[in-house]
Image: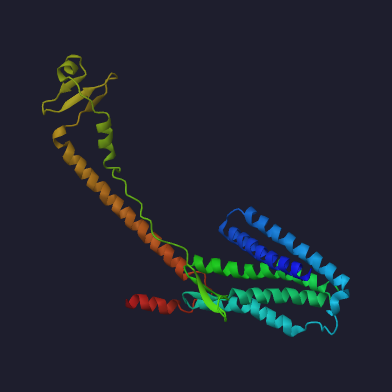
């Protein structure tokens, strides 16, 4: 029975960790959280089931002698737990202030510290009780792990938003001794996506309207019907039904004027693209330099940029 509830504790903790991470990530990115809540709820159910089995085993065996000689945890436990919980995060923030990249974080230490603080609260609140063990496991799984993951996810999101990669150290047990493996959480991708400039703009738009309304006509018939006339300088005039007159375009210089208009539109589009690129670069630099309280390495970075 003991092995069963221990395995349920382990699997439930893994599921709670996954659900908590998805919920925190969805909240920070503005995505729906229902999928993460379902996983979190399933893990919570497993933890509660394991706690019930754990309590039944302890009651049947009269606590199995677990309370004998047990001393309540002291302030040292709390201090060590707080150091493990917040120490790596504070160290990561100092690296962020100093513009180090990648920023090294230690999630296992953070999670262990948060779980230790949750367990300390149970030991201090329920000293020597039979169900102290099950409640402590529930507190570590449902309080310690989510608190630790929240302490991790919020800074990681902040660091990556400000274009700093995060190096999360983990340990694998494939060999006789644990081999350290590195997982890099890359910074947000801010690759500039240049939009294609429109071929036609304000200068060439009238020429497009002329081309759109162009049609083949019989000049002699139009003149006879009073819908066209020719001026002394050779300019043709179209007479509309309401008496309004319109100068018809000449094909001889129409192409040249269209080329000039297209060149003017291209120059205008290039200037707009340059302004957009400059605004994007300023935005990226603001994100890269921002988010810090002091920014210890900002002056050094500026001097390096000026020197280059």
Where, quadrant-wise, is the N terminus in this rendering? bottom right
Q: Is residue 129 visible?
A: no
Residue 73 falls in which quadrant of the image? Answer: bottom right
Q: Is residue 274 left or right of residue 162?
A: left
In the shown orientation, is residue 267 left or right of residue 147?
left
Q: Is residue 26 something that shows in the picture?
A: yes
Quarter of the figure with residue 254: top left
- What residue is drawn where x is 59% and y is 58%? 26
Q: Position of residue 3 (x, y in %)?
A: 75, 70
Residue 204 higher or lower than 4, as above or below: above
Q: Report the front residue among 143 and 61.
A: 61
Please tell me in which quadrant of the rendered image residue 223 appears.
Answer: top left
Q: Which residue is rendered at x = 68% and y = 79% of the image?
A: 82
Q: Residue at x 60, y 59 (%)?
A: 27
Which x, y percent locates residue 244? 27, 23
Residue most toward the top? 224
Q: Is residue 58 left or right of residue 264?
A: right
Quarter of the picture containing the C terminus is: bottom left
**Residue 186 at what x, y percent from top left?**
47, 67
């Amino acid at each position: 029975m003991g092995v069963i509830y221990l395995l349920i504790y382990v699997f439930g903790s893994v599921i709670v960790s996954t659900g908590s991470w998805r919920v925190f990530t969805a909240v920070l990115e503005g995505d729906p959280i229902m999928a993460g809540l379902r996983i979190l709820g399933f893990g919570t159910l497993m933890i509660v089931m394991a706690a019930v089995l754990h309590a039944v085993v302890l009651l049947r065996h009269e606590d199995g002698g677990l309370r004998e000689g047990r001393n309540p945890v002291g302030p040292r436990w709390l201090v060590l737990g707080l150091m493990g919980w917040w120490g790596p995060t504070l160290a990561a923030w100092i690296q962020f202030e100093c513009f180090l990249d990648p920023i090294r974080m230690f999630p296992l230490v953070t999670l262990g510290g948060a779980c230790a603080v949750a367990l300390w609260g149970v030991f201090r609140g329920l000293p020597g009780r039979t169900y102290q063990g099950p409640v402590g496991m529930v507190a570590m799984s449902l309080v310690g792990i989510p608190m630790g993951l929240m302490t991790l996810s919020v800074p990681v999101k902040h660091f990556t938003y400000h274009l700093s990669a995060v190096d999360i150290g983990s340990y694998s047990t494939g060999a006789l001794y644990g081999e350290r493996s590195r997982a890099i959480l890359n910074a947000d991708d801010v690759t500039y996506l240049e939009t294609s400039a429109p071929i036609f703009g304000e200068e060439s738009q009238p020429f497009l309207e002329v081309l759109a309304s162009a049609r083949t006509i019989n000049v002699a018939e139009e003149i006879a019907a009073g819908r066209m006339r020719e001026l002394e300088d050779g300019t043709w005039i179209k007479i509309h039904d309401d008496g309004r007159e319109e100068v018809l375009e000449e094909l001889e210089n129409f192409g040249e004027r269209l080329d000039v208009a297209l060149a003017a539109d291209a120059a205008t589009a290039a200037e707009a693209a340059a302004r957009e690129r400059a605004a994007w670069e300023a935005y990226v630099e603001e994100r890269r330099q921002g988010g810090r309280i002091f920014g210890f390495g900002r002056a050094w970075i500026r001097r390096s940029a000026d020197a280059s």
